[in-house]
Image (cartoon, rainbow, N blue to C red):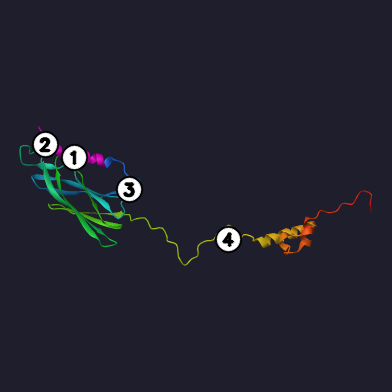
Amino acid sequence: MRIPKTASATALGALGAVATLAMPGSASAQTVEFPQISTLFYGGACWGSIRTWADTSPDYPGRAVLNVQSLPIQGVGPGDYPLAPLCEVDTTVSWRNTGTGATGDYRVTVVSGIYGSILYSLFQDTGPGHIDVTVTTNNAATPVHGSFDVVGPPPDAPKPDPAKPAPVDDKSAKPAPNDAQAADRTAAVDDRAGTGRTSPESITPGDTTAADETDAEPAVSPRGTV
């Protein structure tokens, strides 16, 4: 039995979607799948089940990706290949943020065949928090429910309080000794050593006696003299 071109295209799209789902993602990403919804399709006497799930990640805080994909359907369709039907149904994923009250929905027409459908995905600005989900179709089906959590942005770094003084380094806070303090310490050391030197800072202008005492060498008595 020959497979119609439309059904072949649907099969290739489904295989591509499966390959996309199999790719590894971020280690912190989360995928939450909701219960499958069983529904009738339009375009023939078709029926099947539809998968829906949500992807979240810290890479896109406050947002979620809603995904919709049909499993292979069964039934009879019109045209030259009635045993390989290609049918469709409108599928809606409605969500509500229980913390903020924000609501939204992702509505898409799912075209499916004997190999299922391609993957339908769309970002939703849910905001961070706990999200309740309801999945419905526009044909005979029983609604299903699910939930997932969306992470928020990381907290901001704390800002410095202008009322608090900036920390002071103990080493840099010590004042450097001035010249007078250094001269006093030098004089004290000389006095303890008994050198009798007069510090230059203690010489007053015009006083040559102190200068002579400082510069003069001690007299040495000749050997043998008293």
Q: Nearer the viewer, residue 194 or 37?
A: 194
Q: At which x and y percent is residue 4?
A: 10, 36
N-term-proximal mark, 3 vs 2: 2
Q: Which mark is residue 13?
A: 1
- Give the Cα separation between the discs numbered 1 and 2: 12 Å
Earlier in the chain: of badge 4 and badge 2, it is 2
Q: Magenta span covers which residues?
A: 1-20
Q: Are marks 1 and 2 in contact (CB under 8 Å)?
A: no
Q: Determine the CA span between mark 4 and mark 2.
A: 84 Å
- The disc label shown at residue 173, or none: 4
Label 3 and label 2: CA atoms lie apart by 37 Å
| Dominant SS type (magenta) | helix
Q: Residue at x 17, y 38 (%)?
A: 11
Residue assigned mark 3: 29
- Packing grade of label 3 (10 A; few <14, some 14-19, many >=20) is few
Q: Which residue is mark 2?
A: 5
**Residue at screen point 21% across, 38% down:** 15
Residue closest to the far left: 79
